[in-house]
Image (spheres, rainbow, N blue to C red):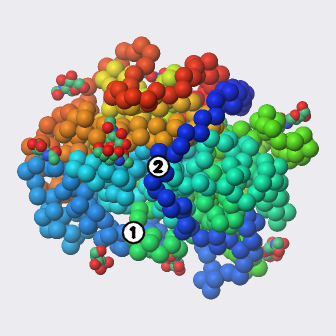
Amino acid sequence: MKLPLFAAAAAGLANAASLPVERAEAEVASVAADLIVRALPNAPDGYTPTNVTCPSTRPTIRDASGISTNETEWLKVRRNATLTPMKDLLSRLNLTGFDTTSYINQHSSNISNIPNIAIAASGGGYRALTNGAGALKAFDSRSDNATNSGQLGGLLQAATYVSGLSGGSWLVGSMFVNNFSSIGELQASEKVWRFDKSLLEGPNFDHIQIVSTVEYWKDITEEVDGKADAGFNTSFTDYWGRALSYQLVNASDDKGGPDYTWSSIALMDDFKNGQYPMPIVVADGRNPGEVIIETNATVYEVNPWEFGSFDPSVYAFAPLQYLGSRFENGAIPDNGTCVRGFDNAGFIMGSSSTLFNQFLLQINSTSIPTILKDAFTDILEDLGERNDDIAVYSPNPFSGYRDSSEDYATAKDLDVVDGGEDGENIPLHPLIQPERAVDVIFAIDSSADTDYYWPNGTSLVATYERSLEPTIANGTSFPAVPDQNTFVNLGLNSRPTFFGCDPKNISGTAPLVIYLPNSPYTYDSNFSTFKLTYSDEERDSVITNGWNVVTRGNGTVDDNFSSCVACAILQRSTYRTNTSLPDICTTCFNDYCWNGTTNSTTPGAYEPSVLIATSGAMKTVLDYSVLAVAMGVAAFML
Ligand SMILES: *[C@@H]1O[C@H](CO)[C@@H](O)[C@H](O)[C@H]1NC(C)=O
Ligand SMILES: *[C@@H]1O[C@H](CO)[C@@H](O)[C@H](O)[C@H]1NC(C)=O
Ligand SMILES: *[C@@H]1O[C@H](CO)[C@@H](O)[C@H](O)[C@H]1NC(C)=O
Ligand SMILES: *[C@@H]1O[C@H](CO)[C@@H](O)[C@H](O)[C@H]1NC(C)=O
Ligand SMILES: *[C@@H]1O[C@H](CO)[C@@H](O)[C@H](O)[C@H]1NC(C)=O
Ligand SMILES: *[C@@H]1O[C@H](CO)[C@@H](O)[C@H](O)[C@H]1NC(C)=O
Ligand SMILES: *[C@@H]1O[C@H](CO)[C@@H](O)[C@H](O)[C@H]1NC(C)=O
Ligand SMILES: *[C@@H]1O[C@H](CO)[C@@H](O)[C@H](O)[C@H]1NC(C)=O
Ligand SMILES: *[C@@H]1O[C@H](CO)[C@@H](O)[C@H](O)[C@H]1NC(C)=O
Ligand SMILES: *[C@@H]1O[C@H](CO)[C@@H](O)[C@H](O)[C@H]1NC(C)=O
Ligand SMILES: *[C@@H]1O[C@H](CO)[C@@H](O)[C@H](O)[C@H]1NC(C)=O
Ligand SMILES: *[C@@H]1O[C@H](CO)[C@@H](O)[C@H](O)[C@H]1NC(C)=O
């Protein structure tokens, strides 16, 4: 597995490096203000996890039989705060024959009857970041034109959860670590999302205080050294997470916020007041030497308060803020100290995307001075073979917690890897936990399943199959989905498709899934997963295409679509309250719900072409087909 990935990385980089560097003017220059407020730089000593005095109630590990008290308390505030945005959204979606405002008002006294909405952004490198960004931009009432009639703006304001995995975690992290920045603000920023410069070479130095690639890597190396010197195991992922942060975290020191923690999201006033949804990042567990088997991999989540897993192998959560402390049997011993600062925001995003950190091996092909290359090579060699593509969570917070034969109870370190390695490239796992009672998931799929890097339902198939294994499913259910051939033959991967429309057909309780596969509406958004640089024009064109994917080209492909989204949002809620949906929903469910039909014959090559012609939207011609061979196994996983 390592070799094809390495080859793919090399090929991807060579290809990316040969791209003409077009710095088109940002289309979004009208959004003038740079990002000002952001999550908190509250780590005690920059990137170095540090001993601190324990709080009077010492932190403990808890079992995963429910959601945390913190989340339960926050939900009371957040769910109430979604009522007004939800009424605004539904009234714009033109659900003829149904008074959505009266309906929500009538049921708001029992919040569990109100639609509970989640959004999931898949992995797939920068393609996933940008395509997912288009979706979130269309869902955001702050975006220009997003609240016109028939648009989906306000969905983000009405949602309870937003999950991200790998490239999708870079998107979710960019938004939430920067204090819920809008996509337009991130596009217009001079400091973040400058993808025209590879993170191997460092940011665009015109705009920031550090002056060169040498200084950039020197800073990163010092930070990772600091963590190692304090006695923490480090891996490639520490470098990777630091480098990512320079592109994603807008810190005032211009150094990617070495002291910005993921847990600080929970301390932001707007978050505490329920003004925006709860972000969740997904990663997988992998024991040393283990090959991940999709049906039993451990799926971790990182939310603003906790790190852990609902899966039977771990079935526990640790307080995120105190990760790095030496927990034994679920508690920090009396003679032990509390540690803070381990949950660096970039490290969390890096953990979800470890498949990419092999890029660091390409440091030699950059223009940095030899002396630095040599130093870096030494460091990478010191890290050794075993640490090639993992994030080390050490000490293992779950050590001795569960009296079981599980490796996770005895391992000194937890090895955490890319969330897509189990084939579930859309981070649905946290959203199908029965305790969260999600009604509808907007599942944004930017995977590169097919030869030409389009999704074909592979991720949904993986999640569905897992739900059929009673031991690992552990109480979760998922709507039935067909095989990938059917996805392609019936076009379920080239337009939005709803799964689980009829709750009576599902064993157990599962959300309705609105599958939103990346497809070319106005732009060929199927860039290679391993493309490391994007001109502003490429970035913004994929974002606009992503907007068009989730709105069906602002309704130009089907002017009923927004009404159909309203039907899907309300389906579970009206089922619970025994309320009939209007006639349009019958048409909608006929048009958008998978009805159980399959056609499993092997399709020909899937080569969709741009649906809505616009002038000047054609992307630079790139032949990625050569890469397809090299990528082999790696591409399959993304
Ligand atoms: C989480 O809940 C605990 C216990 O109720 C509380 O002490 C802590 O302050 C909460 N954390 C945050 C970030 O609100
Ligand atoms: C619910 O939200 C409304 C409107 O935002 C607010 O006025 C009210 O105080 C909230 N109620 C609770 C219990 O939080
Ligand atoms: C709302 O839907 C009705 C019937 O489906 C249609 O006649 C009307 O034009 C739509 N209005 C808007 C603003 O799309
Ligand atoms: C908003 O819509 C108007 C009318 O279609 C269009 O001219 C304008 O460019 C749009 N704005 C953005 C930011 O897309
Ligand atoms: C998954 O199953 C394989 C094969 O039975 C086993 O080697 C591996 O340890 C299992 N992983 C977990 C996390 O249970
Ligand atoms: C704490 O006490 C335990 C048991 O006595 C011992 O094994 C351990 O080394 C001690 N840890 C420290 C940091 O002193
Ligand atoms: C932190 O505390 C542990 C024991 O709890 C100790 O072994 C370690 O040396 C301390 N680290 C620093 C940097 O003081
Ligand atoms: C970089 O090149 C040097 C000299 O060719 C080589 O020894 C080293 O292993 C390379 N480093 C990496 C990370 O590939
Ligand atoms: C779907 O994607 C999977 C994973 O890359 C691939 O193995 C399979 O051949 C694809 N099938 C179709 C019909 O595209
Ligand atoms: C989930 O797994 C845990 C740990 O094995 C177990 O205690 C719990 O009962 C399981 N839950 C369900 C609903 O099966
Ligand atoms: C849909 O609206 C958005 C926002 O105004 C715009 O950027 C996009 O180009 C529109 N799409 C089409 C197909 O007109
Ligand atoms: C189910 O959907 C397929 C197309 O996806 C269609 O051809 C078929 O007629 C539908 N069947 C029913 C019973 O509606």
The alpha-carbon separation of the residues under discs 2 and 1 comes to: 25 Å
For disc 1, the marked residue is: 275
Cβ of disc 1 within 8 Å of ligand 2?
no
Compared across the picture, whether 230 is left or right of 321 comes to right
Left or right placement of residue 478 versus residue 589 in this view: right
Q: Residue furthest bottom?
A: 56
Q: Mark 1: which secondary structure?
A: loop
Residue 525 visible, this angle = yes
Residue 235: percent from left, percent from top: 76, 50
Report the amino acid beneath label 1.
Gln
| Ligand 4 within 8 Å of the CB at mark 2 | yes
Pick whichever of labels 2 and 1 is earlier in the sequence. 2
* Residue 447 percent across, percent down from the top left: 49, 35
SS category of the residue bearing label 2: loop
Q: Quadrant of residue 71?
A: bottom left
Label 1 crowd bin: few (<14), some (14–19), many (20+), radius 10 Å: some
Q: Which residue is mark 2?
A: 28
The residue depicted at 68 percent of the width and 49 percent of the height is 204
Identified at 33% across, 28% down, the residue is 612
